[in-house]
Amino acid sequence: MSVDKEWLTQFKAAVADLPTSLGFNATYDAASRRLRELVKGGLLKHTDVKDAPERFFAAHRTLSALATAMGPGFGIRFTVQFNLFAGTVAALGKEQHLAWLDEMQQRGQLGCFALTERLAGVNSGLVVETNCTWDPISQTFNLHTPYSGACKNWISQGCVADCAVVIANLVVDEKSLGPHAFMMQLRKLSGQLVPGVTIGDMGVKTIGNDLDNAWIQFDNVRLPKSAMLNRYVDITADNKYVQLMKGVPNIDMIGQRLYTGRIVIAESAVVFAKTLFSTTKAYSDTKKCWAPGGARPSLSQIPQLKALYVEAEQRLQYLDHFIYLLKERITPILRDGGVPPKSIVDAIACAKVSCIETTIELCHRLKQEVGSFALMAGTGFERMDYLQCCKFAEGDSRILMQKLARDRVASLRKAAPRPQPAQEISQVPCSSQEASKEVALSMKLAVALKTGGLPAWDEHWEDVYDLARMVVDRTMAEFLASAPTQSRL
């Protein structure tokens, strides 16, 4: 997968100032103004996640390489704009919505993606209690926050956004139809909030304060029928809810942006770690240490640090290559507007889990080995909470691990409907790809669920996460093995 070199050079030049202009103590007003300029410049189009995925991914990788110098704020703001907000509109909207996106780009306007809620955050999965009720008399939607727990929460770029994609539970004829996407104005051209919308700041964070995070409440806000992103679902003239494309669940299409977001975040963590290791090694290569006999070895030659550099290079290269193959596989699907198969969805989840956990581990270990250098501002170590942001963004890693483990147990329970005693586990068929430990642990959990019900899952939580790690390792190995020979490491 390649990107036009001339375009990439132009994009890198357009963002080269960011570590200086948005370094320490940048405000979110300054950062949002800078993004408005970038949006209006048009180097990356709002629809490029579909029309030019290579540019979309290359732009994110470019910004990730700057993260040790400027923190996570601008990169998150950027992916909210071009992936979560604009990408959702591009995937779910029709011509009128795409025209609105074009108009926003020409004006340099910003958007946000209002999904998570106070009592339905990153640990809840795709759950929303904000309601958007169809009114057949006025032919409008009524967007409403029914109680404080349903307030939209931690909405990145929400304090400055002009527009929003709001994920709300659609209600038609008193029937709840689940999460749907609606595109709405948050502010008039004057900057004033539209009636019924209340927005507040989540407060000061440990990192990324150049990014605004908002809570948003809706008080019976009227939206026109055109607010619904209706490529796959719609309200008919006789006020009936219809699915326009059979076999394409609306919730899957909303989840599409989470898939591309997980790839971007996984790659961002790897690029952050590689950058941190590179700049630290440049320092440790020249940092002399005392040794007997007048020798002055460099810090890089200390055995434990030397070994860590070698280990990190191998593990990060493995992950970087895995992400490359994922992007290669998903790019044609994005262009066609299709839904990725389960094998790719699972590989994406595994990539996010593995990339985040590996980079957190490696960067923490590096910090322990370089002494006071890790305490100095400007080294990148002060930005390590960047990886914490990656851990819970676009699907908390723990939730993804729970799903991977649950699906694995379900697959074995389907193959062997009656969970067998431990002594019979060895009789369960196991392909050459599956480790016996994974099968045994899956069956152990299946037996626990059979005898103890759902509470047993929580009681065996350590086994659940151990199983998830096994699934991650196997899935990634199988995915790499399935790649064309020339694409493998």
Image: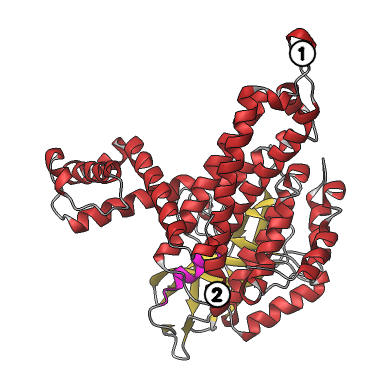
As helix, strand or loop, the secondary structure at mark 1 comes to loop
Q: Position of residue 31 (x, y in %)?
A: 80, 54
Residue 372: in sight, yes or no?
yes
Q: Residue 255 colored magenta?
A: yes
Measured along the vertical axis of the image, is residue 10 above or below residue 141? above
Residue at far bottom of view:
237
Using a 10 Å C-alpha cutoff, classify the residue at mark 2 as few (fewer than 14 neighbours), some (14 to 19) or many (20 or more). some
Task: Kindly identify the residue that appears in the image at 56 percent across and 35 percent down.
Answer: 361
Using a 10 Å C-alpha cutoff, classify the residue at mark 1 as few (fewer than 14 neighbours), some (14 to 19) or many (20 or more). few
Give the residue type at disc 2.
Answer: Pro
In the rendered image, the quadrant that contains the N terminus is bottom right
Q: Position of residue 438 (x, y in %)?
A: 30, 44
In the rendered image, the quadrant that contains the C terminus is bottom right
Give the residue type at disc 1.
Answer: Trp
Measured along the vertical axis of the image, is residue 90 above or below residue 377? below
Residue 93, by quadrant, is bottom right
For disc 2, the marked residue is 332
Give the spatial CA distance, label 2 vs label 1. 56 Å
Closer-to-camera residue (348/474)? 474
Q: Main secondary structure of the magenta part?
A: helix
Label disc, if present, on residue 15 of the rendered structure: none
Q: Position of residue 352 (x, y in %)?
A: 52, 51
Residue 228: in sight, yes or no?
no
Which residue range is magenta in the image? 248-257
Residue 96, by quadrant, is bottom right
